[in-house]
Image (cartoon, rainbow, N blue to C red):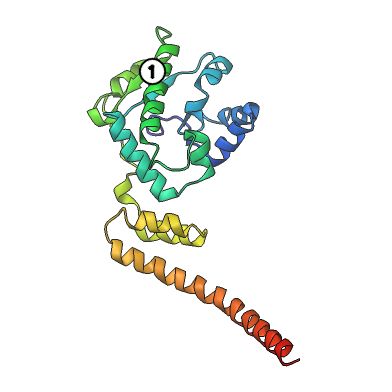
């Protein structure tokens, strides 16, 4: 959309989802009012209200090849970002693991509901970039000449820096999430070594506080016994 000359914005996911959970729809619209095009959360959760608020707007449903492909992508996102409040607000759970069937159903129901809501409206297109289609549908929906355009690939999971992701988990105190992420990617041994070094530092700080207190308590107990 940026390449076509539209002022575009992704999200803001965490902020937008907090506003969504608190029912602050007007504040979300204050964000919408500044852009020609928005994608990602929280907008998929609000398409009915946005369609009513902006009667001249257009909506594009982007899908994956299958619900399993979508779930695999969501799992990678969950491992990278950890069990966050934003994930819970968006999907109703903190983790993909253990919620696979529920999340597949969520994906399928969302797509079908969007198709039904916009059926015969002339305001809607569905695209799957993985199958190489979508540009013609997008151009027709927007009424723009899209010949010669191509779909850029951005935000691919393969481009993520595993070490930086792990360090972010550790910095935020999400050591359990750090271990789960380290076990899910290449270079597991090296990444787990980083986690263990962080745990060693945490343990050292804990013992530095605990040892003097324990020693003082032993002295007091010994004093009572001598009396």
* Residue drawn 47% across the image and 61% down it: 170
Q: Which residue carries the number 1 mark? A: 112
Instruction: Give the residue at the far bottom of this rendering.
Output: 226
Task: Please indicate, yes or no, whether residue 163 appears anywhere in the rendered image.
Answer: yes
Residue 74 placement (x, y as % from top left): 37, 39
- For the N terminus, the quadrant is top left
Q: Is residue 181 above or below residue 138?
A: below
Residue 212 placement (x, y as % from top left): 63, 83
Could you classify mark 1 by the number of other residues whose Cα lies within 10 Å: few (under 14), some (14-19), or many (20 or more)? Answer: few
* Residue drawn 47% across the image and 34% down it: 91
Which quarter of the figure has residue 152?
A: top left
Which quarter of the figure has residue 119?
A: top left
Q: Is residue 20 above or below residue 192?
A: above
Task: State the count of labels.
Answer: 1
Instruction: Give the residue at the far right of this rendering.
Output: 227
Compare residues 91 and 147 and report the one nearer the observer: 91
> Tag 1's secondary structure?
helix
Left or right: residue 144 compared with residue 51: left
Q: Is residue 106 above or below residue 205?
A: above
Residue 56 placement (x, y as % from top left): 51, 14
Task: Please indicate, yes or no, whether residue 118 appears anywhere in the rendered image.
Answer: no
Residue 60 placement (x, y as % from top left): 40, 22
- For the C terminus, the quadrant is bottom right
* Residue drawn 32% across the image and 23% down it: 127
């Amino acid at each position: 959309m940026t390449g076509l000359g539209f002022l575009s914005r992704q999200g803001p996911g965490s902020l937008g989802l907090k506003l969504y959970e608190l029912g602050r729809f007007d504040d979300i619209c204050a964000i919408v009012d500044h852009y020609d095009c928005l994608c990602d959360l929280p907008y998929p959760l609000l398409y009915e209200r946005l369609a009513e608020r902006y009667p001249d707007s257009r909506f594009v449903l982007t899908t994956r090849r299958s619900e399993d492909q979508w779930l695999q992508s969501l799992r990678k996102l969950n491992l990278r970002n950890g069990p966050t409040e934003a994930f819970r607000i968006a999907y109703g759970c903190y983790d993909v693991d253990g919620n696979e069937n529920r999340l597949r159903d969520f994906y399928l129901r969302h797509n079908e509901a969007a198709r039904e809501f916009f059926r015969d409206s002339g305001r809607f297109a569905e695209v799957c970039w993985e199958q190489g289609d979508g540009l013609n549908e997008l151009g027709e929906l927007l009424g723009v000449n899209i010949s010669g355009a191509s779909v850029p690939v951005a935000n691919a999971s393969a481009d993520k820096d595993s070490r930086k992701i792990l360090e972010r988990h550790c910095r935020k105190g999400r050591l359990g999430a750090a271990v789960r992420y380290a076990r899910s990617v290449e270079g597991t041994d090296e990444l787990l070594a980083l986690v263990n070094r962080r745990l060693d530092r945490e343990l050292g700080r804990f013992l530095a506080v605990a040892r003097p207190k324990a020693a003082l308590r032993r002295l007091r107990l010994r004093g009572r016994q001598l009396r």
